Each structure stands twice: as structure tokens, then as C-alpha cells.
Amino acid sequence: MVLILRFILLAFIILFIYTVIKYLMNPKRKLELAHEQKKYFLLDETANIHKNFLLTYNGVMFEGEKYLGTTERSFEVISIFIWPKTVAGLKGLKRTDFLKIEAAIKKQYPDAVIDWKSPVKEFLKND
């Protein structure tokens, strides 16, 4: 009987450690933490073209939509549309900030043409 209780206790300890590690390694949690700390973080499943990516930069959350197309070499992501989740968070961002975001996305998807949705699109056209 004592042996069974020890086995059950050991199983609960292993399950607890596994749960804590899964929580700490969760990419959504990392995104939320970077958003709170106003850092850059890109949450993207590169293997899943149909799933949008989330990006945080200077406390602003952006969402991006990927579109697959053909290049000379293969099928790649050729078009990306990005928009801010909340327009009010854009306060204080400069043109260079958007260029940094584009450069970071270009590292992941070098063949993609990046298009911004309103109001960022109009802001970048004015400069």
C-alpha cells in the first residue's frame, strides 16, 4: 500500500514539473510577456501558411496575414499584410520603427512583399 502511495506521489510530482515546463515554454506566454515589456517578439508557425502571425513591438501588437505564391525556385510566402490590433497603440511610433519591423519579417520571409493596412499605409506614404 505504501509503495502504491509513493508511486502516485511520484507521478504527481512528475506531472507538476511537466506542467510548469510546458507553461514556461509556451510561445503565447512569451508573446504576452514581450508585449508587456515593450520588446520585439514574433509568434509565427512558418510551416502553417494559413495561420496568421502575431508580432509585438514597443508595446504595440500587430497581426500579419501570409499568402503563398510561386517564385523562380519554389512555392514561398510572397505577400504579407500587416495591421495593428489597436490603432491607439501606434502613438509615438516613427517611420524607422515600421522599417525595423519590415526588416525583421524579411529575415523570415525574404521573397515576401509587405503591405501595411490602414492607417499605417497612409502614414508610410506621407513620408
Image (cartoon, rainbow, N blue to C red):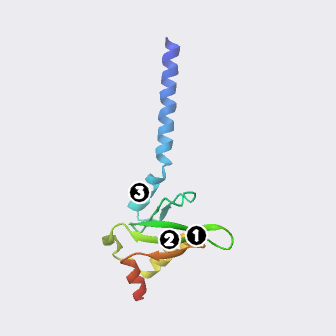
The one nearer the camera, 58 or 126, is 126
The image shows residue 59, relative to residue 28, as above or below, that is below
Q: At 47% across and 28% down in the image, what residue appears? A: 12
- Asked if residue 74 lies left or right of residue 3, the reply is right
Q: Nearer the viewer, residue 102 or 22?
A: 102
Q: Earlier in the sequence, mark 1 or mark 3?
A: 3
Q: Is residue 75 above or below residue 96?
A: above
Work out whether residue 104 can be spotted: no
Mark 1 vs 2: CB contact within 8 A: no
Q: What quarter of the picture does the C terminus occupy?
A: bottom left
> Residue 105's x, y, as percent?
53, 70
Kind of residue at badge 1:
Gly
> Residue 80's mark?
2
Q: Earlier in the sequence, mark 3 or mark 2?
A: 3
Instruction: Give the foreground label among 1 and 3.
Output: 1
**Where 6 sits versus 87, above or below?**
above
Residue drawn 51% across the image and 26% down it: 11
* Residue 69: assigned label: 1
Q: Which amino acid lies under the numbered mark 3 shown in the image of this protein?
A: Glu
Query: How many dots with numbers?
Result: 3
First reached walking from the N terminus: tag 1 or tag 2: 1
Comparing 36 with 121, the one in front is: 121
Q: Residue furthest left?
A: 88
For the residues labelled 1 and 2, the Cα–Cα distance comes to 11 Å
Q: Give the number of the disc on residue 32.
A: 3
User: Relative to residue 111, is residue 43 drawn left or right?
Assistant: left
Q: Position of residue 121 (x, y in %)?
A: 41, 80
Q: Please, is residue 66 above or below residue 30 in the view? A: below
The CA distance from mark 3 to mark 2 is: 22 Å
Say which element carries label 1: strand
**Judging from the image, what secondary structure is the residue with disc 2 in?**
strand
